[in-house]
Image: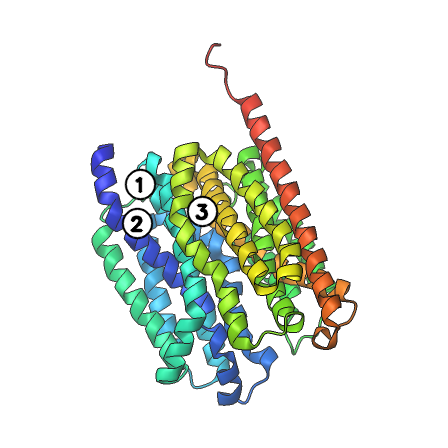
């Protein structure tokens, strides 16, 4: 297939992959607005109904690497279609659930399909989109992910007003159905291998990794309400499972995550930077509302509008970020994105204290394009040199590092904020103390972004040093 033909045929493929990414993103965010209604419908506590959201996120996190591996073994198109079918069936189960327990089960199953929808679009884009347009493709996928985050809560509220909470899951089933039809029509060829053996599936490694990731998810999300174990217990399980995972992966013939991926400098640094930036991104979502509510005194409606500014800016700048990546190259665009992210975080640390809502919005407008440029460039840098047999797993690892970053940011950065406030009751803390804690928290995240920038510069210098000399 010539590059011209690939460029022409890539447009419907990109639309399909964007729809798949949007489906998975909506699956995360649309349920958040339903939680107060679910507490009344099922006479449940907030800690119980929050698992309607956490079950999906945890299920995605623990299976996303395996989803990428299945795509490598059985064909990315085939597994994407299977993931959409699972997502549709789980959405129908959630919509019809007569109890909270069955709803949470449906959401966990929905997360299995969602993991495939997150992991495979990047690898399919790498297979079917011309190399010179890969950055644009990554930017588009980042845009649709941000669009799902922005649209989910408002869309869920509209559906809730039109009927009841079940409407949200019927909508997800219908949207995934449309995406399934697009996938069958637009993605007409696959990259599956000629022969596949189930012995190539790393069941021991998958099991140990699931245990490690589940324990980490429970540690960062505060455990399960009826199993009151301290986070250190879960973290101990994580460390033990990681050691076992390394031992297993070094011994099996077809490992889930070949250790040479993690030892390969470009990949390992890219995954680590993806985790760190994702943790920083999450800090704006978990800390921002406290500052807006308890320091600036905004009501819930205004807070929602202000918080939506970040995702909406991401929607506008996702595709341009990909275009810049294609024009400047992934390495240069990544550095520019990290510099802008650091500047944006410093703006967020101090401008809102002196200029209120306008300072907060100006900071988000500065910060968010930096996030988008980094994500498009980093995803491109990790995948562009990967051989076909690696792309599914690497896409899964990128998704995994992102989710681990989100969970880490939600836990550790919010803990830092509360610690600086100096009281567990942030709602009754003096407004000046909340504002000070907000500034110190985002000064710390700016430092983390600066460290990530240093890591990126170091990695690029090492890559340049190790690159073969054409003159030799």
Disc number for residue 359: none
- Kindly indicate the quadrant of the structure image that contains residue 8: top left
**Of helix, strand and loop, which one carries label 2?**
helix
Q: Distance between the Cα atoms at labels 2 and 3?
A: 16 Å
Q: Distance between the Cα atoms at labels 1 and 3?
A: 15 Å
- Kindly indicate the quadrant of the structure image that contains residue 269: top right
Relative to residue 376, is residue 458 depicted above or below?
above
**Of helix, strand and loop, which one carries label 3?**
helix
According to the picture, the residue beneath numbered tag 3 turns out to be: 395
According to the picture, the residue beneath numbered tag 1 turns out to be: 129
Q: Earlier in the sequence, mark 1 or mark 3?
A: 1
Image position, residue 177 (x, y; %): 28, 66
Q: Residues within 10 Å of mark 2 (few under 14, many from 20)?
A: many
Relative to residue 309, is residue 399 depicted above or below?
above
Do tag 1 and tag 2 residues touch (Cβ < 8 Å)? yes
Judged left or right of residue 421, residue 254 is left
Image position, residue 116 (x, y; %): 40, 56
Image position, residue 183 (x, y; %): 26, 56
Front residue of 169 and 113: 169
Residue at 59% from the left image edge and 27% from the top image edge: 462
Q: Earlier in the sequence, mark 2 or mark 3?
A: 2
Q: Is residue 120 visible from the viewing direction of this image?
A: no
Residue at 54% from the left image edge and 56% from the top image edge: 362
Judged left or right of residue 136, residue 258 is right
Q: Distance between the Cα atoms at labels 1 and 2?
A: 8 Å
Q: Residues within 10 Å of mark 1 (few under 14, many from 20)?
A: many
According to the picture, the residue beneath numbered tag 2 turns out to be: 14
């Amino acid at each position: 297939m010539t590059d011209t033909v690939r460029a022409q045929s890539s447009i419907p493929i990109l639309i399909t992959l964007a729809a798949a990414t949007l489906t998975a993103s909506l699956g995360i965010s649309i349920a958040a607005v339903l939680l107060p209604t679910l507490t009344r419908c099922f006479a449940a506590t907030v800690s119980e109904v929050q698992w309607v959201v956490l079950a999906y996120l945890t299920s995605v996190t623990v299976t996303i690497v395996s989803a990428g591996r299945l795509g490598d073994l059985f064909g990315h198109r085939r597994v994407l279609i299977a993931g959409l079918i699972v997502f549709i069936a789980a959405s129908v189960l959630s919509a019809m659930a007569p109890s909270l327990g069955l709803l949470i089960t449906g959401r966990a199953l929905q997360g299995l399909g969602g993991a495939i929808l997150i992991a495979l679009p990047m690898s399919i884009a790498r297979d079917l989109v011309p190399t010179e347009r890969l950055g644009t493709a990554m930017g588009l996928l980042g845009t649709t992910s941000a669009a799902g985050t922005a649209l989910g809560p408002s869309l869920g509220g509209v559906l809730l007003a039109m009927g009841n909470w079940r409407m949200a899951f019927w909508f997800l089933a219908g949207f995934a159905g449309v995406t399934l039809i697009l996938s069958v029509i637009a993605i007409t060829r696959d990259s599956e291998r000629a022969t596949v053996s189930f012995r190539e599936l790393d069941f021991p490694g998958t099991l140990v990794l699931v245990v490690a990731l589940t324990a980490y998810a429970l540690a960062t999300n505060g455990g399960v309400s009826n199993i009151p174990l301290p986070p250190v217990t879960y973290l101990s399980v994580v460390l033990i499972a990681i050691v076992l995972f390394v031992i297993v992966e070094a011994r099996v013939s077809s490992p889930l995550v070949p250790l040479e991926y993690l030892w390969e400098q470009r990949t390992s640094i890219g995954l680590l930077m993806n985790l760190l930036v994702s943790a920083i991104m999450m800090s704006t979502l978990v800390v921002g509302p406290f500052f807006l509510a308890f320091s600036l005194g905004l009501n819930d409606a205004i807070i929602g509008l202000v918080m939506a500014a970040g995702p909406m800016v991401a929607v506008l700048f996702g595709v341009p970020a990909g275009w810049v990546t294609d024009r400047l190259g992934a390495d240069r665009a990544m550095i520019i994105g990290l510099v802008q992210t650091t500047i944006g975080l410093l703006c967020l640390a101090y401008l809102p204290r002196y200029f209120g809502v306008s300072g907060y919005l100006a900071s988000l407008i500065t910060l968010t394009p930096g996030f988008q440029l980094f994500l498009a460039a980093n995803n491109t840098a990790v995948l562009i040199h990967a051989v076909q047999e690696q792309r599914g797993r690497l896409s899964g690892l990128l998704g995994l590092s992102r989710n681990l970053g989100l969970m880490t940011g939600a836990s550790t950065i919010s803990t830092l904020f509360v610690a600086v406030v100096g009281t567990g009751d942030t709602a009754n803390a003096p407004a000046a103390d909340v504002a000070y804690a907000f500034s110190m928290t985002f000064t710390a995240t700016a430092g983390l972004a600066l460290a990530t920038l240093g890591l990126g510069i170091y990695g690029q210098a090492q890559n340049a040093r190790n690159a073969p000399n054409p003159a030799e």
